[in-house]
């Protein structure tokens, strides 16, 4: 995707318009783009928003979910049926409001591990990479264990917060446990 001269500064939010015919139009490049190209924007960390061409409604989440759906339908899905079922069960549940933040923090933690691993492995030949990964197995297990412990701690904090909120609400209605 080529940039036009004089367009918005780099890093400015890119606006993608979605038309009724389901086509996506990149206003920065003045061209139609595909979901694959939007996925590339995500991979590059480029800020963008997808808006309905008529109503200006924000459709970004919907498009991102569509990309995830296509990825899941492809070769190797990331989410098992069990994970998807459990996520669905959180909708409408008291924990729904906490689940998004919980997942976001855990994914960020895994992304931090991936970034550190990539930094440590820069410039390695295939043979060195194999040796590096053999040494990383215990380290990776340690990082996964650490991530799990952080996740458990975060979940415990969420439970405490919910309990406090419940107690405050009960007190407001003159009910105490």
Image (cartoon, rainbow, N blue to C red):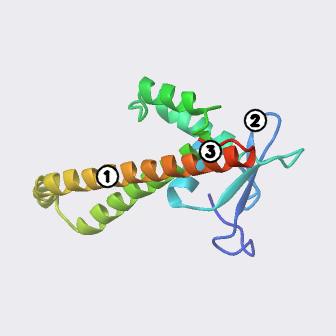
Residue bearing mark 2: 22
Residue 158, x across and y down, in percent: 51, 49
Mark 1: give few (<14), some (14-19) or many (20+) Cα within 10 Å: few
Indicate the secondary structure of the residue bearing disc 2: loop
Indicate the secondary structure of the residue bearing disc 3: helix
Contact flag, marks 2 and 1 (Cβ < 8 Å): no
Question: Which is nearer the eye, 175 or 51?
Answer: 175
Residue 15: quarter of image:
bottom right
Indicate the secondary structure of the residue bearing disc 1: helix
Residue 18: quarter of image:
top right
Quadrant containing the C terminus in the rendered view: top right
* Residue positioned 33% across, 59% down in the render: 113
Q: Which is nearer the N-term, disc 3 or disc 2?
A: 2
Question: Which is nearer the eye, 19 or 165?
Answer: 165
Residue bearing mark 1: 149
Residue 54: quarter of image:
top right
Residue bearing mark 3: 166
| Disc number for residue 168 | none
Residue 129, x across and y down, in percent: 16, 58
On the rendered structure, is 52 left or right of 45? right
């Amino acid at each position: 995707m080529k940039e036009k001269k004089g367009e918005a500064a780099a890093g400015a939010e890119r606006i993608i318009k979605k038309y009724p015919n389901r086509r996506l139009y990149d206003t920065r490049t003045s061209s139609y783009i595909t979901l694959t190209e939007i996925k590339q924007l995500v991979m590059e960390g480029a800020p963008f928003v997808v808006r309905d061409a008529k109503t200006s409604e924000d459709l970004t989440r919907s498009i991102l979910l569509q990309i995830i759906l296509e990825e899941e339908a492809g070769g190797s899905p990331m989410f098992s049926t069990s994970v998807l079922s459990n996520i669905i069960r959180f909708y409408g549940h008291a924990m729904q409001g906490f689940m998004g933040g919980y997942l976001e923090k855990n994914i960020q933690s895994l992304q931090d591990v991936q970034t550190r691993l990539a930094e440590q492995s820069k410039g390695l030949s295939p043979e060195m990479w194999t040796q590096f990964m053999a040494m990383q197995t215990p380290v990776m297990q340690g990082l996964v264990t650490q991530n799990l412990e952080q996740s458990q701690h975060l979940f415990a904090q969420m439970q405490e917060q919910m309990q406090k909120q419940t107690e405050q609400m009960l007190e407001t209605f003159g009910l105490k446990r």
